[in-house]
Amino acid sequence: MTIRIFVTGGTFDKEYNELSGELFFKETHLPEMLLRSRSTLDVTVRTLMMIDSLNMTNEDRELIAHQCRNAHEDKIVITHGTDTMSVTARMLAEKVPGKTIVLTGAMIPYKFGSSDGFFNLGNALAFAQSLPPGVYVAMNGRAFNSDNVRKNKQTGQFEELH
Amino acid sequence: MTIRIFVTGGTFDKEYNELSGELFFKETHLPEMLLRSRSTLDVTVRTLMMIDSLNMTNEDRELIAHQCRNAHEDKIVITHGTDTMSVTARMLAEKVPGKTIVLTGAMIPYKFGSSDGFFNLGNALAFAQSLPPGVYVAMNGRAFNSDNVRKNKQTGQFEELH
Amino acid sequence: MTIRIFVTGGTFDKEYNELSGELFFKETHLPEMLLRSRSTLDVTVRTLMMIDSLNMTNEDRELIAHQCRNAHEDKIVITHGTDTMSVTARMLAEKVPGKTIVLTGAMIPYKFGSSDGFFNLGNALAFAQSLPPGVYVAMNGRAFNSDNVRKNKQTGQFEELH
Amino acid sequence: MTIRIFVTGGTFDKEYNELSGELFFKETHLPEMLLRSRSTLDVTVRTLMMIDSLNMTNEDRELIAHQCRNAHEDKIVITHGTDTMSVTARMLAEKVPGKTIVLTGAMIPYKFGSSDGFFNLGNALAFAQSLPPGVYVAMNGRAFNSDNVRKNKQTGQFEELH
């Protein structure tokens, strides 16, 4: 079973810049994480962009949708900032039919000791293999349908809309 | 969706005893891992035993099967040593019908920086929610059916029998 | 041998705020670090402030000097942001005679996996015990005299002035 | 100021063998630790042996003494298992005059999240630079003289003999 992973940035991949004291994007940690997971899945990783999801434009989302449609795999995991993950999920649900697409991310950068990112990646890869076609958000241990999910800004948790 | 986690020990939960210089079992790290994952799943954790799976007896396996049958949840994750995980999986497949049971573990203790355990837990919890009733081994990013899995002792990876 | 540790903030103690996505100060990690070090030193930790050293004012430095003079210990370690560590060191050298004062910090927050902070704390505590009275900066494995040190903003390393 | 580091093994450098489930020695973590510390010290690392200090023979100790005498540096740090660290320290005090030699190690392997090793290395490197000629054990944040130190097997802490 082959899976495609698209990297778009988000907290997941943020690093600490020791000269400026600010968080920034260098390279994705996905290959390192897959190695550590001892995954024997047939996975291809491709970085589409490295941005904060608050800065993601409609053009960026069109690009992601285009890449999802063009990928020869029909199981896709997308790493994404949490702030607008639900927005991208809904847009992909409209534009990319017939594939199982799972968006995931992290509340804490992978390089911080307490990150949830490694768990979330395991979660998302499993949902991508086992759920029927559709677009999902894999956060907080669960898979939310793209048409029924939002991030609660007060708690930082994802929840159903109704 | 409620999930039951049964803890049986294995590499997953091994700690370093700084007085003896040996690895040993203290307490399970599951609650700490669930907290770190920011899981909002309705999960109950129960420790059944804390042993090396090489030392697991038929009586131990009978106890696990009994607990799986008696649990009111029909989605169950079992943390287990990797060496005899396939053996326990096959036995549970015979004795516990009608539930989705996912066994998982780790090649490296959770407390080691390079552990695969946190990823595996995310993987197992997703498979427990999404796979049909049956018994599975969630390792190396994949879900293996209990009747078609073994640990390859040379590579340390799980693989299909045929 | 008793040692006083004064906490003033800096990168050392920065945490990741998962709701805002920004770095911030919560509480000092010093007690946790001392526990992990298995130190049997007679150490008292006191937090004076929790600030970025770029925001440190003359009043803040006067407060630190006052606390150093008033401490009954004559061996003092101060955790401090790296950007103005040399400035505070020079000021303390003028205002607090007769004590061994060692300033240290970190280029990467302690909570990041790759932090230098734990090493630097071990370094600073050793220099505080073994160097003659004076004010020192303990960074990059070395003890710099307060009158001959600066942070090179290009490399992020501390170096002698001449 | 140039410092020589001799590696002899000990808990410090133990790794987890994921195939056998046992702790073992692969390679020293010293270069990785020095990089992470951002040390700008002039340090040369040489691995003399990779053994449990309980298995260290008189011949091994003769070799260490020989290497210390022959080193052109007069500041030396030795990483060493904690169980017989005091024994080696006393022997070196007899056989290697005129140099500052600091033995250090760890109660928990560096690769475990909770290791004291990185702190101890910072501690030992500072004592090696600042203490007068003699042989010392740097553990628990302190420098013990070789003629007045033992490891308390009950507490795991180093303490004075009298």
Image: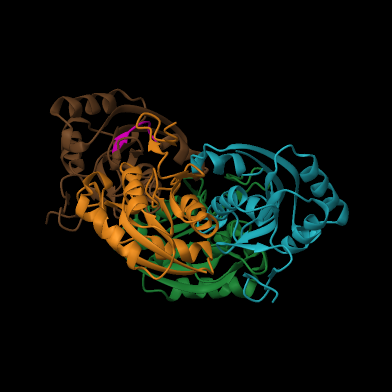
Chain colours: A orange, B cyan, C brown, D green
Asked whether residue C25 is drawn in magenta, I would say yes
Residue at (44% x, 65% y) in the render: A74
| Front residue of this view, candidates A11 and A2 | A2
Rendering coords of residue B41 (x, y %): 56, 38
Q: Which residues are magenta?
A: C23-28
Please say whether residue D10 is visible from this viewpoint: yes
Residue at (83% x, 53% y) in the render: B95
In which quarter of the view is residue A154 placed? top left
Q: Is residue C69 left or right of residue B30?
A: left
Rendering coords of residue C6 (x, y %): 33, 31
Asked whether residue C128 is drawn in magenta, I would say no
Rendering coords of residue A111 (x, y %): 38, 52
Q: Is residue B100 left or right of residue A99?
A: right
Q: What is the residue that sits farthest to the left in this orientation?
A: C162
In which quarter of the view is residue A158 placed? top left
Residue at (79% x, 50% y) in the render: B96
